[in-house]
Image: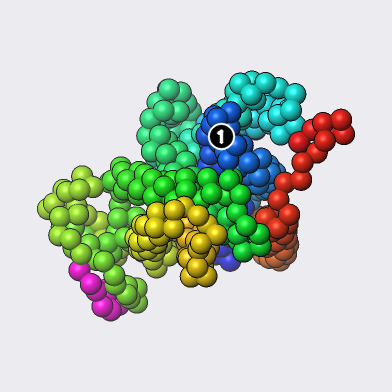
Amino acid sequence: MTQTAWVLSLSQFYLSLGFVLCFLALELGLAWVLFGFRLFAGRSQAALLAYRFWVRVFALSLILGFAASLLLVLQLGTLWPGFMDRAGEVAGPLVGMAVLTAFIFKSCFLGAMLYGQRTLSARAHTLVVGMVALGTSLTAWWIVVLLAWMQWPVGATLSEGRYHVADWLELLGGGLAPVLFGVLLAGGLLLAATLMLAVTAWRTEIRPSDAGDRSVYAWGLRLVLLALVLQAVLAATLGRDLLPLQPARVASVVPQWTSGPPARLSLAAWPDESRQHDAWRLAGPPGWAAWVHLPAEGPLRGLNDLAGIRPPLMATYVSARLAVLLTGTLAVLAGWALWRGHRLGHEPDNLSRAGRAGLWLMAWLAALLQAAGWGHLLIGSLPYAIQGTVSLREIGTDASEGVLWAVLCLQIVVFGALLAGFYQLLRHATRYGVVPVARHRGRA
């Protein structure tokens, strides 16, 4: 497999995986937010109005994420045909359970959630919404377990080049899976909250707010800060568990050029790979090694001893700093928005142009934060598909570079069209709202 073919295959797969993770996180966050709205809908007209609008957005994100996941499963076989031969005993059941959960558990309740509100009792419909949220969580869980296992293959043994399951309980509930799922859930809540705030600000430019808009605005401001703090804590915990397992990632994050005692972590630097040192460096805290359970006196492998088995240096280094910077920026903006919202009496009609722009900026920054965080997780594990044992080159496709180029360009066009369609439908729903349907003519 040539270097160009490897990069093209990786670009295709990561583009699909990133698209799926983005909409899966949004779907997961919205599912639990909708369950919260439905719980209070019996006592609050505002919660019912908010539910009836945002359930449409949830359905749209679910369809896009599901469509992209089919392509992702297909690419797993076409781009990395050797993966199932090496890890099929682990990956096969997990992928099968994700598909089974999506098709049966979640979709069966989804129909009743979307079309049964007028025919079911309030309690029964609330239960259905809760089951959809649970089904969405289970679908995400199987995917996260596989991603976590590829970072740290617990519960399985490698024999004759193939992985065999030794302990399903350890594989499903051990390793990095619980913390990584928490990161996905917190990120989904953050995406959902910032999107709700941005759309509410957009709607109030078109028409006066209703009780649902005010409810979304008030609770969204609180949810942003809660989700951001939760994701930051879980991401830090994930890094603390992950870094000792992957010396190449540690060397790229520090960066550590020569083997020996851990170098001082840099807050910012410009790594010069040609000269094997930093062109400039802003030193960070000295005690970082003990925090991630690394021996203070080393030895820690350096980049010069990891040639050929380390991830892309600049992408790994920059994505980690970008995630931290975006988290801090979002925290400042979320604190400011919460303070302003309290001063305005949680009335979105009173937002200034700068206030509305700030809410829109938060939505974009939240999406960039998820891209930076998941990008660092995936890029930092290169060149391995399964950490430390199976490299991507071993399991890659033998397709020609021309075919890979053509498919990548087509994939970019298709995903661009899907994103444009999502934006247009969201814009239409924002402008015209939810149109009630009469009982005798249909179900709303």
Task: Determine if the magenta segment contains residue 281.
Answer: yes
Question: Dot 1 corresponds to which residue?
Answer: 44
The residue located at (71%, 22%) in the rendering is 120
Main secondary structure of the magenta stretch: strand
Instruction: Kindly indicate the quadrant of the structure image that contains residue 310.
Output: bottom left
Residue 30 in sight here:
yes
The residue located at (53%, 42%) in the rendering is 29
Q: Amino acid at mark 1?
A: Ser
Task: Determine if the magenta segment contains residue 242.
Answer: no
Q: Which residues are magenta?
A: 275-283
Q: Quadrant of the C terminus?
A: top right
* Element assignment for label 1: loop
The residue located at (32%, 45%) in the rendering is 233
Q: Is residue 122 above or below residue 15?
A: above
Image side of residue 413 versus residue 312, left or right = right
Q: Is residue 271 above or below residue 255?
A: below
Query: Observer-nearest residue: 409 or 129?
Result: 129
Where is residue 210? Give x, y as percent.
61, 49
The residue located at (17%, 48%) in the rendering is 290
Q: Is residue 94 above or below residue 80?
A: above
